[in-house]
Image (spheres, rainbow, N blue to C red):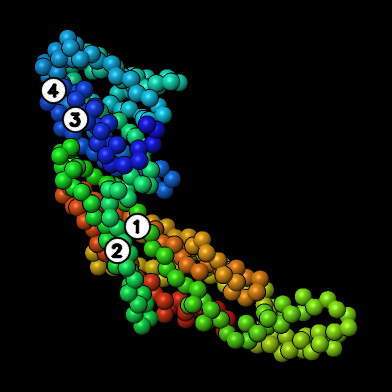
Amino acid sequence: MGTLHSIKDLLEVSRDLSSWIKGEKFEGLRIVCKEHEHLGIYTATVHAGSIFAKQYTKKFGLIRKFDPREVCDVRIYGLKPLCKRIYDVVEHRPSEIVLNLKKIIEMNLESFRLEVIYRMDDISLKGLVRSRSSPEPLENRRLYHLSAQLKDPNSLIAGFSECEIEEYPVTVDVFIQEDISTNIPYYIKRMSQIEAEILKDYDPRHGVRIIELQKRRAGLKRRLGKEDLRSKLNELSLFLRPTKFRNNYIEIRQKKDFILDHCRWGADIFRALGILMLPKTMEILTKTNLSLDKKAASGIMVYESGRFSEDIQKLFSE
């Protein structure tokens, strides 16, 4: 099977494990969302009394083998009276992972917890959770209404006593191209155009025209003061560092269901001033937790567009 592509796949492998583990047990599902790999973790807390021992010894066997192409890891934790992870009941071989519950019975544990960890892809998460980020433009800021909710909690309730989704990602694309372009002074834009014209005109017969362009550039340079255009453009690029943007202009307000995770330049790039390439958007990743007790999450993310625009103006006026 490899990576699981839907919650149905995870439910199927979990039910197979559930039918294998006889006796009194409490089952749950935990999904851990990571940037490059998501994990579906089946958990079973087992009360290892005499019935459990007899059933496994006489009828069902005590050894279970897993394909490492399907399963990341298998873990056993003692709960009572020994409370720690037990490593020697799981053996990792090149072609299989072997779980041997004989040692659990030999240790006379009253209870233990089994965890079987599967890889899950983005498709499986989208099939489990419905999410959105809706923008609302205001005068000096932009609000993004964030929401996430379980699509079909009833199917999870039928299979598990508890289900948790940790750090489910909701991405917000904050459009900043217009805020940048409209706040770069005209003389900076004109200077950039003149420099581009000078660089692309190699015809020696156009010397008079080049001299005229150089005079215009010199006049505009006086407005920059001691700095040249290239250093100002470098300052603008540094100004747009993702961490700085997130810390200074992005905030989660009201309900704290969502947290800010990280920020990065969006994939689309535009030419701001000839040679300078800048992002059209900032991609903000937010995260939230969901469960059968908390089936939906909501929140508001704020982008301080007015303050961002003012700071770009200050950058060129300094």
- What residue sits right under mark 1 in the picture? 170
Q: Residue, x 12% and y 26% (percent of image)?
A: 24
Query: Quadrant of residue 92 in the image?
Result: top left
Residue at x 18%, y 52% (from the top left corner): 294
- Assess disc 3: are there few (<14), some (14-19) or many (≥20) residues with their C-alpha within 10 Å of its C-alpha: some
Residue at image location 31% in from the left, 61% down from the top? 132
Disc nearer the start of the sequence (2/3): 3
Going from N to C along the chain, the mark reached first, 1 or 3, is 3
Closer to the camera in the image, 173 or 112 = 173
Q: Is residue 265 visible?
A: no
Name the residue tied to disc 3. 45
Locate the C terminus by quadrant. Answer: bottom right
Q: In the rendered image, which residue does mark 4 sit on? A: 23
Q: Earlier in the sequence, mark 1 or mark 2?
A: 2
The residues bearing labels 2 and 4 have C-alpha atoms spaced at a distance of: 43 Å
Q: Is residue 317 above or below residue 1?
A: below
Type of amino acid at the residue the image marks with label 2: Leu
Upstream in the sequence, badge 2 or badge 4? Answer: 4
Q: Is residue 26 above or below residue 131?
A: above
Look at the numbered discs 2 and 3 and tell me whether their residues touch, using CB distance below 8 Å.
no
CA distance separating discs 1 and 2: 8 Å
Q: Where in the figure is residue 40, as x and y percent of width and height?
A: 31, 38
Tell me the residue that label 2 is attached to: 146
Task: Tell me the CA gap for discs 1 and 3.
Answer: 31 Å
**How far across and down, in percent of the image, does residue 284 sit?**
41, 61
Secondary element type, mark 1: strand
- The residue most toward the right is 205
Q: Is residue 8 above or below residue 212?
A: above
**Badge 1 vs badge 2, beta-carbon distance below 8 Å:** yes
